[in-house]
Amino acid sequence: MPASHTASVILQQRHAQAVVAVLALILALVASGCVVQQNPVTGRQRAYAWSWDQEIRLGQEADQQIQAQYGVYDDEALVAYVDSLGQATLAESHMRRPDTPERFRETEFTFRVLDSPIVNAFALPGGYIYVTRGLLTHLSNEAQLVVVLGHEIGHVAARHASARAVTQQFTQIGLLVGGVAAGEFLGQTAGDMVLGLGSTAAQFFFLSYSRDNERESDNLGVEYAVRLGYDGAEGGAFFRSLARITEQAGGGIPAWQSTHPDPGEREQRIPELDREWRERLGGIEDRRNEQDRYLRAVAGTVMGQNPRQGFVRDDVFYHPDLAFRFNVPTNFRTQNEARQVVMQSRDQDAVMIFTFAQNASTAQEAGRNFAQQDGLTVIEEGGMQINNQRAYNVIADGRTQDGQDVRIQSNFIEYGDNVYAFIGYTLRQQFSDYAPRFRGAMRSFDELRDTAILNIQPDRIQVVTADRAAPFRSFVPEELPRGLSPEDLAIINQVQLDEQVEAGQRLKLPGQ
């Protein structure tokens, strides 16, 4: 979770208050039935779950939730670079052609870089396109990025989300209602506990595209790249990297690949699409990849996890930017997100969340707000001190929407400019087993004083020119960023570990 201040807390409060209204909007739109409108890519009429105006409105709502959940990468030059490429690609798309209806041609598109190390790109209806800094780290040139951006623009232009929602909408309602109920019960932003997102954004993440949708977007992404004069075949090398990431994950599929065709298939198909589009468009000869310009743009980008936004070492969570630390219960898996740290037991029968308290300026106010929620039976509450910080303790019983009785241990702590919330819960009959671990973690919260950790800096992309011909392995530094292996670094550079690197070849290596 990155550094925050009063403005960030207010933003979260407003987001939480808006989610129920957003859910009502979605249900109203779904209940209103299908609309028949034009597909900007094919020009044909077909049924959609939402009108184009509704798609824009839903995209705007979800965009706020995506920004709050993942955070936007703080590098104006890099963001401007991605936006400029996105707008240039958009200009070649079906959204900007003279015969496209005005309502589509006048829709503004927004391109964002999310502050996440995960290799991911996705689109929301209405013209919102996202790439992560993790994806940018793994690309080798501008042509690959243009193919990715064109692919996501293709999803929006072909209205894939709205078309899929026609057949999936009833499933989505069930998921959203479940997410909101769990979130409200635990006092978190609705949907966070189950989906990790506000309800509008969650809807689109659960609306998986079909493989035909993905193949159509691949085709569009290559078409737009070729029209811009790029070598669309370069996109195949990126899909080779995705296949290697899959292997590294033990067969797990990267987020962007979860519903897509096999990466190996796409690696072969994309160069074929490039050839087809060059023939169809009259033999376009331009094959730019603009590697040097791309590497200049991404140089200095954070590589891997950013330790300043929080990291775990030896069962202790440290946050250098916010200058605090606390113990993580033994055998709990930790996931650090933009607005919260989620800790889950090995057996997945207990969860603890650390986050910013909402709608409160003191620990006491936060604790009492929590205790007064409908559906909770308070067992114990009262003020306390945790390592000289004012705190408030609440233990309460509640029931999940599926009828399970749970017990909740919560501590609210004033520290710096924020009020933080620890919330741990498990089934009531297991609470005595987990209570000592909940309390131990919560009451270990303290100021971070270790200057070495306070001053820790992330590793960043350093672009170097190979000074010799040698295997890539010989260029790998002895010390790598936390969580990054030599094979990971080879994938980032789209080479094999033992592949011969030629003198003068440009490489992305970690540096500070």
Image (spheres, rainbow, N blue to C red):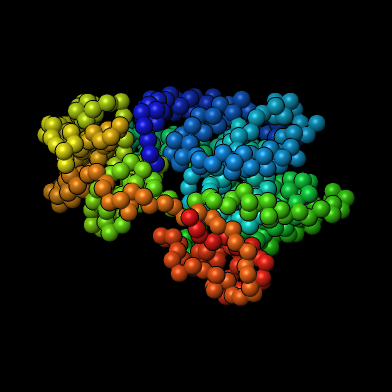
Position in image of residue 269 (x %, y %): 70, 59
Above/below status of 323 relative to 482: above
Q: Which residue is drawn at 31% across and 29% down?
A: 358
Is 54 in front, or is 416? 416
Q: Residue furthest right?
A: 282
Is 306 in front, or is 269? 306
Q: Residue at x 39, y 47 (%)?
A: 308
Position in image of residue 121 (x %, y %): 56, 47
Rendered image quadrant of residue 155: top right
Position in image of residue 140 (x %, y %): 63, 57
Residue 255, visible in the rendered structure: no
- Determine whether, in the image, residue 250 is placed left or right of residue 407: right
Figure quadrant of the N terminus = top left
Q: Which residue is drawn at 25% across and 35% down?
A: 415
Is 214 in front, or is 94? 94
Above/below status of 373 relative to 139: above
Residue 104, visible in the rendered structure: yes
* Total count of labels: 0
Is 124 in front, or is 461? 461
Position in image of residue 91 (x %, y %): 74, 37
Above/below status of 59 relative to 262: above
- Determine whether, in the image, residue 171 is placed left or right of residue 398: right
Q: Which residue is drawn at 30% across and 43% down?
A: 323
- Determine whether, in the image, residue 386 is placed left or right of residue 122: left
- Determine whether, in the image, residue 208 is placed left or right of residue 45: left
